[in-house]
Image (cartoon, rainbow, N blue to C red):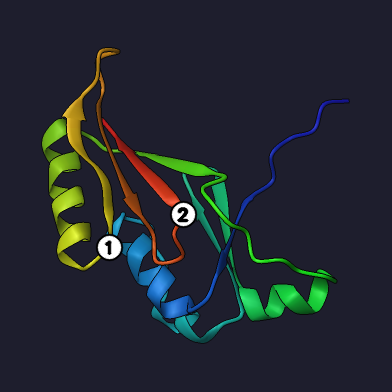
Amino acid sequence: MAARLKRVGIYVEQMKRALDFYRALGLTIPDDADEAHHVDVEQDGIVFAFDLVESVKRIIEGWNTPIGNRTELAFQLSSREALDDVYLQLTALGHEGCLEPRDTPWGERYAIVKDPDDNLISLVA
């Protein structure tokens, strides 16, 4: 039997700050989730689970804060122009741009920003 991906878990320091970033990416997240310790958000068949680091530390004994970029989440945009607009919007909100929008040799428009918890978020069109 093969394992099936159930959800993508994202550990966050501040729930509202993180959820605002993902709202700017287009995820539909209710405002009352901002004060929660755990939030599940389903989009296009993928469940994103946001958990406060303080809660995770109570469950995972010996928690060590990760160092470095270990995972990248990629979000598909509807067009090259939409990608450029989202990148500009996120960086204008103060999120770090790691790779400005560019056309790649493999035919995609591609950019990378960091979410508030330093996760790499790719934008692809």
Residue 102: give x, y in percent of width and height. 18, 30
Mark 1: secondary structure: loop
Amino acid at pointer 2? Asn
Q: Is residue 4 above or below residue 91?
A: above
* Residue drawn at 74 percent across, 76 percent down: 57
Kindly give the residue lying farthest to the bottom in the view shown: 35
Residue carrying label 2: 119
Kindly give the residue lying farthest to the top in the view shown: 106
Kindly report the distance in space between the C-alpha atoms of the residues bearing marks 2 and 1.
Answer: 11 Å
Mark on residue 35? none
Front residue of 122 and 67: 67
Residue 49: give x, y in percent of width and height. 60, 61
Q: Is residue 47 above or below residue 108?
A: below
* Residue drawn at 54 percent across, 44 percent down: 71
Residue carrying label 1: 95
Amino acid at pointer 1? His
* Residue drawn at 46 percent across, 65 percent down: 117
Mark 2: secondary structure: loop
